[in-house]
Image (tube, helix red, strand yellow):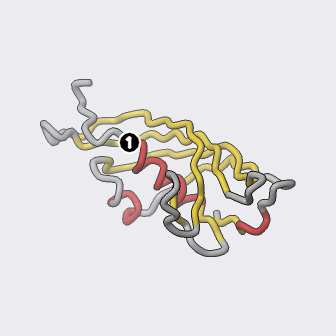
Amino acid sequence: MRVQKGRITFEKDFPLDEAISFSAEQVATLYPIIDVRYCHIKGLLYRDEDDKLYADVDVWAKVRYKDGLTGEPFDHDFSSMGLYEILEREDGEGEGFIFPGSELDIIELSRSIIKFEMDPYLSKRG
């Protein structure tokens, strides 16, 4: 799903509640995650009084990791709750995700959140 950024104003938020499917190419960028069996994003896109765009969202997914020590795949329940600024370009002021253009791709937002929040050293042993 793509959202027109212009539809989101200080007076009008945009609620999200979407099941997400990733392509093989999108999953490949998430290594050591080797498969995303299910993903869901829920929350709100909104602008503050300074016209900055934010995503206040929860993302949860059933993923398959590759254990860094043994190479064995194992299943893991990923979850993240966060507030992320959506930027047009690097602004040097804070943290956020850069999505230039008039549209925000919710699949790419979900992928970016998983990539940012995942534990790259997760092991089957715990």
Task: Please provide percent x and percent y for residue 87.
Answer: 57, 63
Give the vertical position of 48 relative to 105 (above or below). above
Task: Please provide percent x and percent y for residue 49.
Answer: 78, 53
For residue 123, side relative to residue 22 (left or right) = left
Residue, x 13% and y 37% (percent of image)?
69
Residue, x 24% and y 40% (percent of image)?
73
In this view, the residue farthest toward the bottom is 101
Give the vertical position of 54 relative to 102 (above or below). above
Task: Please provide percent x and percent y for residue 81.
Answer: 56, 36
**Mark 1, other Cα within 10 Å: few <14 / some 14–19 / many ≥20:** some
Residue, x 44% and y 36% (percent of image)?
78
Give the vertical position of 63 relative to 108 (above or below). above
- Residue that mark 1 sits on: 118
Q: Secondary structure under badge 1?
A: loop
Q: Compare residues 107 and 112 and report the one nearer the observer.
A: 112
Task: Please provide percent x and percent y for residue 122.
Answer: 28, 35
The amino acid beneath tag 1 is Met
